[in-house]
Image: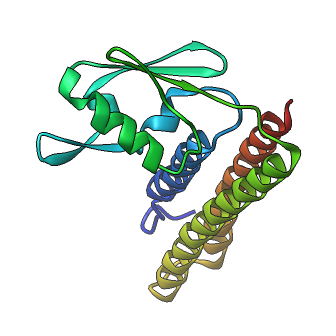
Amino acid sequence: MSDEIEIDTDDLERRMKGAMESLRHEFASLRTGRASASMVEPIMVDAYGSPTPINQIGTVNVPEPRMVTINIWDKGLVGKAEKAIRESGLGINPQLNGTIIMLPIPELNEERRRELTRVAAQYAEHARVAIRNVRRDGMDQIKKAKSSGMSEDDQKFWEGAVQELTDKMIASVDQALEAKQAEIMQV
């Protein structure tokens, strides 16, 4: 193998891991019937004239498996935070207790669980597509290197390395999907 032409597999791996990290973040936002602080991360509250993430105006805790509490630091923002939660589309009815907003997480019915598993599968497919796009970029780099003098043996080596990396990342997406679907279907 010649040392003259190399393909940057570290960059490809970094980009594939980015797709995987994005998938984990999307999975965390799925409501599974179990309380999670990440459920409220996307909620923006109109605080002091600008949209602010709810976790920046109060402390988010998960004291019980089916309860999220948010201790709002500024009493004046409690009403706005409650309104933002109601309008967020989470389907959770907040309960006020002074400056603490309690979010009881209801049980999911079977139909909703199946729907969430389909959503999780869509997220996983998006991650697979992103990983395949990175693979395609890597293969394009190899083709360009081939046209600029890479030997056929080197080409086969790098194609194998890129494919192996792709297979590994796709397998980790599939693993994450299986785990998330099992978590969603758990009653």
Q: Is residue 183 above or below residue 138?
A: above
Q: Is residue 79 above or below residue 102?
A: below
Please tell me in which quadrant of the rendered image residue 165 appears.
bottom right
Residue at left offset 85%, top offset 39%: 185
Identify the image quadrant of the C terminus: top right
- State the count of labels: 0
Q: Is residue 51 left or right of residue 93?
A: left
Name of the residue lying farthest toward the bottom: 147
Locate residue 74, reporting x and y percent. Answer: 19, 22
In the image, 132: left or right of 68?
right
Residue 58's x, y, as percent?
Answer: 30, 23
Q: Residue at x 47, y 51 (%)?
A: 14
Q: Nearer the viewer, residue 33 or 11?
A: 33
Picture quadrant where residue 96 is located: top left
Percent position (x, y) of residue 84?
37, 44
**Residue under the point 52% across and 78% down:** 150
Image coordinates of residue 9 in percent, x first then y, are: 51, 57
Q: Residue at x 69, y 64 (%)?
A: 125
Image vertical order of residue 186 relative to residue 15, above or below = above
Quarter occupied by the N terminus: bottom right
Q: Nearer the viewer, residue 168 or 78?
A: 78
